Structure formats: structure tokens, C-alpha cells
Amino acid sequence: WLAMRDARRLLRRGRPRRAVAVLDDAAPALAGLSRFRLLREWAGAKAGDPGPLLKDSPQAGERYDGAFPVLLPLYQAVTLARLGREREARERVGAARRANSGRLGLLTPLGGEAARIDPLLRARADADFVALVEQDFADEAPDDARRALTLAVEDAEARARTPEDFHLAHLDWLRLGRLARAEKDLRRAIALAPRDAVYWSDLGVLRYRRGDAPGAESALRRALSLDPSLPAAALSLGVLLEKNGRDAAALALYERTLAAPVADAGLRAALLEARARLAGKAK
């Protein structure tokens, strides 16, 4: 296990050949572990020998036990993307996603994927898959981690059908810092569910992050027109008004929002703090 830890550290530092040497030294003791074999082939691919990792045969999956059916195609996908073989990389990500659906018990006896039919199941499966990719690649080199997560989000986005699908994809793009892609998917969600106040509120925040204060205010006001009791939209709009020097309007908004129960303790605390801050300035 120490050898595997050291190998991962070497990979993060851009020394794949040294990582291969460390793993090969430990091979007699660890060769029977699926995770070790996967790491060794991954290190070999990064050192310039992708063949063993990309081996594609009916027996390929037998190299790993049932604990890693998702990870093998993921590591293959990242390697293929690094080699510029994008179409094959996307196919491997699809295979990883299907394996993850099996892990979640979402494959039907007839071989179909229940998540394809049930929008809620699909949203859950997609969110779980993206989270798994983010977690497993957290210790990888930043470019590999980003490449893996991008492939996973693109796969989920390509299959998005419902407003929630697109909303989840937008959240994933935000985690990657891809604001334009995030807004594109969020606007798709709004097009399918134009009266969802939460989507409009999220669009307001996103427009502000992209430097469009008037667009942000418009979207936040739209959210509050659909749901006047939405505290997140009220807080965001209030902060925007404060930044524009419109303290009286912001204070009135905070007062109006706090006049009704605010279930989220964090939002309520933030609204109370904002109201106290502006009330203090007014004295």
C-alpha cells in the first residue's frame, strides 16, 4: 500500500516512469490486487505504454474484480482523450456509466437500464456517476482529474432530457469553472420549465458571475415574481442591490423576506445578518 501511495504521488508530480519502477518493485506482493493492477497499467499508459490499459478483448474485464467495473473504462477514457481519440473516449465513459448503473442496481433483468426510463432515477444515477468520478480522480494530476470529470459531465449532458437533467449538468459545469457551458444547460432547463423560480434564481447568480449585473437583477426579479418567498433569490438580489448602492431597497427586501418563515437555517442567518448590517448603516 505504501508503494501505491508513493506511485500516486510520483504520478501527480509528473514522474510516471519512476512510478512504474516503484510499482514493479512491489509487484510480487501486490500483483493479486485489482486496484494495484489498474494503477500499474495507468502509470504505464502515462509513461508512454497505453497498450495494456487499453487492451480490448472478451477477457479484458476479468483483469479486475467486481469492485472496479466502473474505474477501468474511466481510466481508459482519460487515456484515450489524452491521445486525441475522443470518440472512443466517449464510448468508454458510456461503458463506465452503464457499469455504475449496475452497481446502483438500476439494470433490469432484460438488460435495459431503468435510469433511461425514469427521469428521477436517471438524475440520481448521473449525479452519482459524476460524484464517483470526482472522488476517484481527486488524487490524480489536475489535468487528468479535470479531463475525467469533463468526460463524465459531457456524457450526462448528452443524455439529458428533463429540466432536472439539465440543471444537474449546469451544476457540474460550475464545479469545473465552465460558466458558459453551465449557462447553456441552465437555459435549457428554463426553456423546459419556465416557471421554476429556482432555475431563474440560479441564472441570476450565474449572470452576475459572468459580469452581467443587469441580467442578473432581471433573472432574480423573475424568480421572485414566480415565488416571492424564495429566500435564496431574495438574498442574492439584496446583495446585488447593496453593491449598486441601493441600500434602502435591499433592506426592504430583507425585511419582506424575513416576515415569512425561512426554513433553511443558513439562509435565515444570512438574511438576519444582512438586515442588521444595513440597519446599522442607516442609523
Image: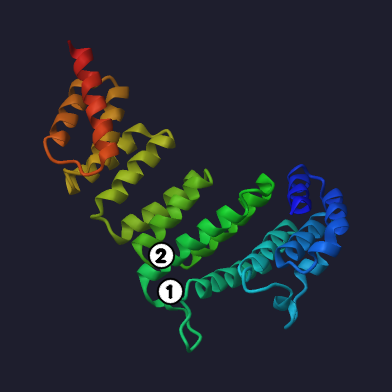
Q: Residue at x 85, y 52 (%)?
A: 22
Tag 1: amino acid: Ala
Which residue is nearer to you in this view: 115 or 65? 65
Can residue 160 be seen from the camera position used here? Answer: no
Q: Position of residue 186 (x, y in %)?
A: 39, 52
Residue holding disc 1: 115
Q: Position of residue 179 (x, y in %)?
A: 48, 44
Q: Can you name the residue that lies furthest to the bottom here?
A: 110
Between discs 1 and 2, the one toward the N terminus: 1
Q: Position of residue 51 (x, y in %)?
A: 82, 68
Q: How many numbered marks does the figure carry?
A: 2
Residue holding disc 2: 123
Q: Residue at x 42, y 69 (%)?
A: 122
Q: Quadrant of the C terminus?
A: top left
Marks 1 and 2, how far apart at CA: 8 Å
Q: Residue at x 18, y 31 (%)?
A: 253
Q: Quadrant of the N terminus?
A: bottom right
Mark 1, secondary structure of its residue: helix
Q: Can you name the residue that lies furthest to the front here?
A: 29
Which residue is nearer to you in this view: 283 or 226? 283
Instruction: Specify the label residue 82 is tagged with.
Output: none
Which residue is nearer to you in this view: 120 or 194? 120
Mark 2, secondary structure of its residue: helix
Q: Residue at x 76, y 50 (%)?
A: 2
